[in-house]
Image (cartoon, rainbow, N blue to C red):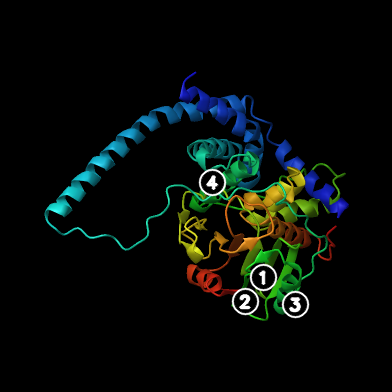
Amino acid sequence: MSRTEMGDLNFDALIGPHLDAGYRTALAILQNPDEAHDAVQESALKAWRKLHQLREGSPARPWFLAIVANHCRSERRTRWWSVIRMPEMDRVDHEVQTETIDIDRALATLPRDDRLALFLYFYLDLPMEEVGAVLGVSPGGAKTRVYRAAKKLRPGLEMD
Amino acid sequence: MEKLRSEIRAAFEKEQAAHPPITALRRNVVEAVTARQRPARNFEWVAIAAALVLGALVVVGLVSTRLAHRASLPVPAATQPSPVASPSAAPSVPASPLPITVAAADSLIRTTVKGANPLLLPSAIPANWSALITNLSPSFFTVTYTSPDGTKSVNLAITVPNPPPPGSNGSQSYPNFHGDRRSLYQVNDTTQATSLRLLMWNEPGTWSEPNALPGVPYYMTAEGMTDAEFWSMANLLHA
């Protein structure tokens, strides 16, 4: 087996399992499936080139998700037409709870990094260590970020 | 909190459900990446060879005209510094952190963290900032200082971090901070004056935790601060 083939296998084994989480993260930031797909592909390419920087034994998931998040941040900054997309509301469904709509609206207007912190922690179920690694802060800093973002949604919230 | 957790989760699930998973994403991406990478590597070798030839020509030219002089700037290390995390370097985070004064935080950290010498804390944090200690043990601590208006924050920790590389607008440098050749300074986006920036280094000294590198692994990050502000904080750490 050639060195290149070995590299392909290592890359697939290390990063492959996290591509879907990467896509979901990109989707949460960019709100556009095509752009999210491009972002995860570009991020995977960058991860391949920087694979030697991943410390042996350290988890690949937060490292790769951080690359995705950084790429998406850069993408959003370069879009002069960028707008805040509000979540789609089903106007026909009268059963939708007002509280849920409030959360949707509040989430949509949160600062990008606050929203990302909540997404990583509450949706992807990442531990604080990994949330911190993705956001580029310590686990303690990540906890602060999640707590602060959650408080913006529900003032008066007490963290468990 | 649990109710909010389920509400947030439901909101994200609804948002994500609008876009079904991409079929064969893993296979497509891995194939695309590896296919794009192979020819690129060939060009890399050509570029490296060309750079070596050019470098040799420059050196010969300089020597022959006796104009060569050594640059005074330190040469960055070839690879990113990578202190190896020890399995025990995963302390628990205490629950329900509450902001306290900077002085109270310093006092609390100094009375608890006895396994790190020197124990460095910033002296340039204004007294009206708040401090939040989210991790504290005899060997580790994490404290976040935040300005009254919440626009600036500095995070200082004894921890073994593994920061990801920055985005396309980011930068990395090796400032030889406190004599640590492997110290890394990273700015996530150089096009933004107050982008997230981080500094990691091993402070010469002793640490009670096993670590592959000598000294105490410090990690400092800042948000909402300029380069000058960051370094004024970093240069005023004191034992």
Give a yes or no on whether discs 1 and 2 share a subunit. Answer: yes
Which residue does the numbered mark 1 point to in the structure image? B145
Q: Nearer the viewer, mark 3 or mark 2?
A: 3
Q: Which mark is residue A71?
A: 4
Q: Amino acid at mark 1?
A: Tyr
Q: Mark 2 — residue? A: B125
Which amino acid does the dot numbered 3 rest on?
Answer: Ala
The amino acid type of the residue labelled 2 equals Ile
SS at badge 1: strand
Residue A28 in view (yes/no): yes
Circle 4 packing at 10 Å, graded few (<14), some (14-19), many (20+), is many
In front here: B221 or B116? B116
Discs 3 and 4 carry the same chain letter? no
Foreground mark, 3 or 4? 3
Q: Are marks 1 and 2 in contact (CB under 8 Å)?
A: yes
Q: Secondary structure at mark 2?
A: loop
In the image, are marks 3 and 2 on the same chain?
A: yes
The residue pinned by badge 3 equals B104
Residues marked 3 and 1, same chain: yes
Compare residues A55 and B26 and report the one nearer the observer: A55
